[in-house]
Image: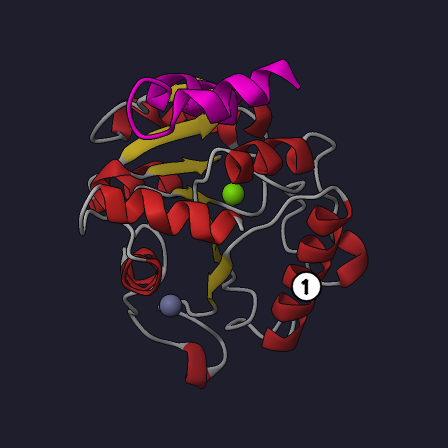
């Protein structure tokens, strides 16, 4: 039913594409622990489910994009990355939230495993993965938000031509304090965590993309 509502709204605007919210994984939706090299290391932040549920209710596609070079280094198999994403999806579902897709890059230019050693187009801040998602979900990258805790996430958003949001979890606070002078552009929004980031995004787009009724419903609940 929700899909139908979305479809008709899209139809009402003609063939126009919509914006999405691209989320980094480690340090943004879950604890930054170095490498999640075992399923037991995955720790979703306590506010993540609520944050993503708010995006769902606002009708915004939610796409997770993550660099997992530990695969290329041979620290853990690609299968683990899929298991971790399944676990995240399950935990989100338990709270009525949903990510539309998970994309990951297993490569690194100096990967130990030859099969993964390359200068790929998908490792953030390159935009290969978000371009794939944009094509698949008919997303307008310039109307999209890119949320993450690291310099790479901000550069990804800049490279994709969208709005950038830095969260202070994970590497966020340190990167903001010590690396921001090296960034081509300061983040458009800065937030303590993903929930605050989502609230700021919804506030910013409240007047245009999303119908006010839905937002009113959300803040009233
Ligand atoms: Mg991160
Ligand atoms: Zn890659």
State the extent of the magenta-drawn residues as a range. 196-221
Q: In the image shown, does 31 or 212 lie closer to the viewer?
A: 212
Q: Is residue 206 above or below residue 182?
A: above
Residue at 74 percent of width and 42 percent of height: 95
Residue 160 in the image: state x and y as whole percent: 23, 46
Residue at 37 percent of width and 38 percent of height: 146
Q: Is mark 1 within 8 Å of ligand 1?
A: no
Q: Is residue 62 above or below residue 187?
A: below
Q: Quadrant of the C terminus?
A: top right
Residue 208 in the image: state x and y as whole percent: 28, 23
Farthest residue in the right direction?
Answer: 40
**Which image quadrant is residue 47 in?**
top right
State the residue position of label 1. 86
Is 135 part of what is drawn in magenta? no
Q: Secondary structure at mark 1?
A: helix
Q: Is residue 177 visible?
A: no
């Amino acid at each position: 039913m929700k899909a139908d509502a979305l479809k008709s709204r899209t139809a009402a605007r003609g063939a126009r594409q919509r914006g999405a919210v691209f989320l980094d994984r480690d340090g943004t939706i879950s604890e930054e622990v170095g490498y999640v090299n075992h399923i037991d290391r995955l720790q979703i932040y306590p506010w993540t489910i609520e944050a993503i549920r708010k995006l769902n209710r606002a009708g915004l596609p939610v796409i997770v994009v993550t660099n997992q070079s530990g695969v290329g280094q041979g620290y853990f198999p690609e299968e683990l990355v899929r298991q971790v994403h399944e676990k995240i999806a399950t935990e989100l579902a338990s709270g009525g939230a949903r990510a539309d897709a998970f994309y990951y890059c297993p490569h690194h230019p100096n990967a130990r495993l030859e099969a993964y050693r390359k200068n790929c187009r998908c490792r953030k801040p390159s935009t290969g993965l978000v371009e794939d998602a944009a094509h698949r979900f008919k997303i307008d990258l310039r109307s999209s938000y890119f949320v993450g805790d690291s310099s790479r996430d901000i550069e990804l958003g800049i490279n994709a031509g969208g709005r950038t949001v830095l969260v202070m979890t994970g590497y966020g606070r340190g990167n903001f304090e010590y690396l921001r002078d090296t960034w081509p552009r300061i983040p458009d929004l800065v937030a303590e965590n993903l929930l605050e980031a989502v609230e700021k995004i919804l506030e910013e787009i409240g007047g245009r993309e999303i119908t006010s009724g839905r937002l009113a419903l959300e803040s009233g609940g």
